[in-house]
Image: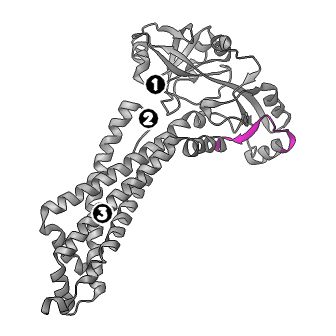
Amino acid sequence: MIRKIPLAWLQLTREKTRLIVALAGIAFANILMFMQLGFREALFDGNVQFHQSLNGEIVVINPQSDALLSLKTFSQRRLYQVLALEEVESVHPIYIGFTSWRNPQTRKLRSIQVIGFDPDSSIVNLPGVQQNLDKIKQPDVFLFDQGSRQEFGTVAADFLQGKAIATEVGGRTIRIGGLFQLGTSFGADGNLITSDLNFFRLFNQDGRKLGLIDLGLVKLKPGANTEAVLEKLRNSITQKDIRLLSKQEFIDFEKYYWASSTAIGFIFTLGTIMAFVVGTVIVYQILYSEIADHLPEYATLKAIGYTQLYLLIVVFQQALILAALGYLPGFAFALFQYNIVQKETLLPIAMTISRALLVLLLTVVMCCVSGAIAIRKLRAADPADIFS
């Protein structure tokens, strides 16, 4: 088969303009697929960054909760019932809510996510949190996420310059005592972390009551089997008002919500499919034109003894050459776009090996499907038409 490649290559390069247009079309389809898949993964990864940072093995939530941004509260007494198992080391209530943030510079309001927990417990593994836990013990002191969008103001930059920062959050004046790194998601553009007491000072006017928590984190003793403990808990505790999940199940729970219960997850999937279809049509048009223009030559090859299989292999080689040459500029430009999107949106979007291989595979399949459709024209190459 290798010795037959020059014919496929020579046919493609015979008309340079047509080849460049074909490669541009394939690269465009590749870029669309890279961006749609990249946004889809950023959707998932961005919304589970907090989940992954939890320093515990089991998570307790209200069964009516759909996702982190819409958690329903439940009684913390249900969380403390988990302590009855000897494998459990400790339990930790976590409070999550959304309120308004006033930009210190522009004074504009924007919704921000607030996370509260007992600062004496190390339950969140995020850069900047551990070294600032003592600060949030002070009244109305909060940690600001330096991965928040720029619409929240130049808080991080000003704090690093030693400036004192105070602003209005939820109608209450608060101070920034430190920075941490979480990042934006499709659910929250900015984040604050504070103590449980400061959380209730902030949300008291919204009717939040002590004893009602949004999330419960369970730490197990070293050596305890998470699945075995979960099974025990599910058998021993009535679960009408709580749901017990492993940390990984909690992550999957969040991803499932964004993939199946929101329009945005469907849109990114549909965008990938449409990019594949567009690329298939472009390659088909190129290959069909190549075959139509060289139909007499194909008929001559048949007349001198070349088989139909040989000619089919030539067409598929053209498809594979187009796939390889079109993929390279698409991959390079996708890297450039990922960098721009990450800087502008602060979403966790980056090229991965698995995604690069997936798009390469889709490109090869796309071109082969186009070739399979285009070869129907090749069957019309009848030697009798040439010599009649």
Q: Which quadrant holds the C terminus? A: bottom left
Label 1 Cα crowd, 10 Å radius (few <14 / some 14-19 / many 20+) = many
Q: What label sits on residue 323 in the rendered view?
A: 3
Q: In what element is the residue under mark 3? A: helix
Lateral position of residue 61 relative to residue 274, left or right: right
Q: Which residue is mark 2?
A: 347
Q: Which mark is residue 148?
A: 1
Whether residue 353 can be seen here: no
Check the image and report above or below for 92 versus 197. Answer: below
Looking at marks 2 and 1 on the same chain, the residue that comes earlier in the sequence is marked by: 1
Q: Is residue 239 in the magenta section?
A: yes
Residue 2: image location, x then y, percent: 26, 78
Residue at figure coordinates x 70%, y 15% from the top left:
207
Question: Is residue 329 left or right of 369 when viewed as pictured?
Answer: left
Are there few (<14), some (14-19), or many (20+) residues within 10 Å of tag 2?
Answer: many
- Which quadrant of the view contains residue 91? top right
Helix, strand or loop at label 1? It is loop
What residue range appears in magenta? 235-248
Q: Specify the amino acid type for callout 1.
A: Ser
- The answer to whether the residues at label 3 and label 2 have Cβ atoms under 8 Å apart is no
- Residue 371 percent across, percent down from the top left: 31, 71
Q: Which SS class for mark 2?
A: loop
For residue 198, above or below residue 243 = above
Instruction: Please state the horizontal and vertical placement of residue 260, each as a whole percent of the image.
Output: 57, 46
- Which mark is first along the chain, 3 or 1? 1
> Does 360 sit above or below residue 190?
below
